[in-house]
Image (spheres, rainbow, N blue to C red):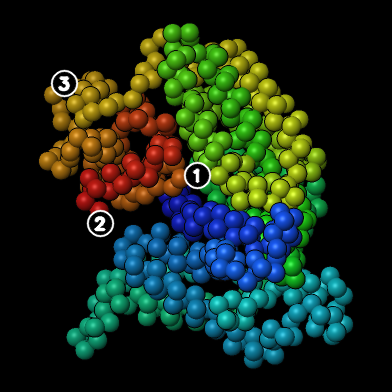
Amino acid sequence: MKEKFQSFGKAMLVPITLIAISGLFLGIGSVFTTELTLVSLGVNWDWYAASPLFTFFSVFKGLGEVIIGNLGVLFAVGCAFSLSRKEKGWAAFSALVCYLTMLKTVEILLGAAGLAADNTTVEALQKVGLTSIQASEQSALYTTSLGFFGYSSGVFGGIIVGCLVAWITGRFYKTKLPTALAFFAGSRTIPIVSLVAGGVLGGIMYFVWPVIGGCFSGIATFVKGSGLVGTFVYRWVLESLVPFGLHPLLETPMYWTELGGSMVVDGTRVVGNSAIQLAQLASPSSDKLLVRAFMAGYGINDYALFPGIALAMWSCAKPQNRKKVAGLLIPTVISTVFFGVTEPILFTFLFAAPWLYFGVYAPLSGLGEVLSEAMGVSVYQGNIKDLIPFLFRPEKLNLLPYLILLPAFFLAAFFLFRFFITKFDIKTPGRDDGDDIELINSRAEFEAKAAEAKGESGSTPEKAVQGRATKDSALAVGIVEALGGADNIDDLDNCISRLRVIVKDGSKVADDEVFTKNLEAMGVIRLSDKAIQVIYGPRVGEVASEVHEVLGDE
């Protein structure tokens, strides 16, 4: 089960990667196509609106809107592609077929019931006797997507389709048929089955989605009505899921579905706290960004807590080790502040003392989210990369409370962690005379250290891939062998900071120390005997590419 959760979490990152870039396009494009902003800068709007510059930035903005406006189909294709271990191209194509079929089936069934886009608006529903709240809740169930009128299943509908098609791919990609039908055998069976499955799924959605949609509205109502207590619980639980790579299961629905609330922006109903803020960014109004978007806590984490923790670990290191520890921690702080990649810093203390993470850091993060909300912080995400588009619209931000909160939480993290590290003699980097903080730089060095770690002298650590390695792939060779060899790796992919691996036999995988001491890993998480995550931080994409090359993957 944990292997499946790991794969699911990885799949969420496929469309999310594109969403992050689309936000940048949307932000920059909206700045240079908004009359209020340009007039305030002294630009002649009548001249500018007819100029090639306006057209150029309109296209730029459109590049972002096309992603944000079609998240359902993107999650369908992305999840099917990522979750399928075989025939990924057929899986992605079949997911599109399945998703379109589902939408068309729902549209036909709704039409048979007398429901259409023109009679399910809030105004139309109020005319038949519903109150404004009832009409709003009822209308929220429907939308028009890719030209099809149907339910607002959005990201959830896409995820369901993606998972279904991934299963279909694994089940039918080797299908054998009689000679007369041989053309449709094998991988060609996948889109055929997906076409039928989309129709069946559409029929199920027609009956089930009103109940599911009602549940989403109920949960969203609970979150909205739970006040600051709910805010604290949400952030604490979210941060507690990060080490296991399961945070997208909670984070993604809050960002892009009813669970994150809904708001009408420029006459269009938008669901999900991240989607709402991006829509507000594109809006010509000067209204502040949604405050209760559970975003400000990221700023507390990235700008204050993690830098404070890093300084505490550096100050607790032995004097002779501080220079090396600084070399380790400074890049991790930079990756956190500028790019929001937090695993490199959190894993430097998580394994030494898990209770520090769950019992000190996570509650501090929850408190930071609560105080940010109470003080009205309006911000998008918590790192400089994601904040850049919004800096062009400063009237939408409220960062002044950070002038108090960031120093306070930086100092709180520094003193608390320094106290606990010294009080309980926690072995954070540099606190052991024998700490090996240096990274390996060559294949020969890896072989020597691997043999030393295993108590061997003359063994060859890359039997399964012998002859295929080069000097540049030495690290990848070591990773493959530490995972039990190429034949033991059932599935390998990566997210933002980790290699996510499914192995056939967990007993063949090397000890965590082999990865951290000899293979440059920041940490290892074993979700189960077969599901393993190896943390490499921002460079994980490069590492994964090298490993795939050693494995001979296409």
Q: Residue at x 87, y 75 (%)?
A: 131
Mark 3, residues whose alpha carbon is within 10 Å: few (<14), some, or many (≥20)?
Answer: few
Q: Are marks 2 and 1 in contact (CB under 8 Å)?
A: no
The answer to whether residue 103 is visible is yes
For the residues marked 2 and 3, what is the alpha-carbon distance in whole angstroms?
35 Å
- Among numbered discs 2 and 3, the one appearing first in the sequence: 3
Quadrant where the C terminus lies?
bottom left
Name the residue type under label 2.
Glu
Give x and y (percent) for residue 146.
Answer: 55, 77
150 and 31: which is toward the camera: 31
Mark seen at residue 457? 3
Give x and y (percent) for residue 426.
Answer: 52, 17
Q: Which residue is mark 2?
A: 554
Name the residue type under label 3.
Ser
For the residues marked 3 and 1, what is the alpha-carbon distance in whole angstroms?
37 Å
> What secondary structure is marked by label 2?
loop
The answer to whether residue 8 is visible is no
Q: Residue at x 44, y 47 (%)?
A: 495
Q: Residue 188's quadrant in the figure?
A: bottom left
The vertical placement of 419 against 402, above or below, is above
Q: Which residue is mark 1?
A: 245
Taking 85 as reference, is 242 left or right?
right
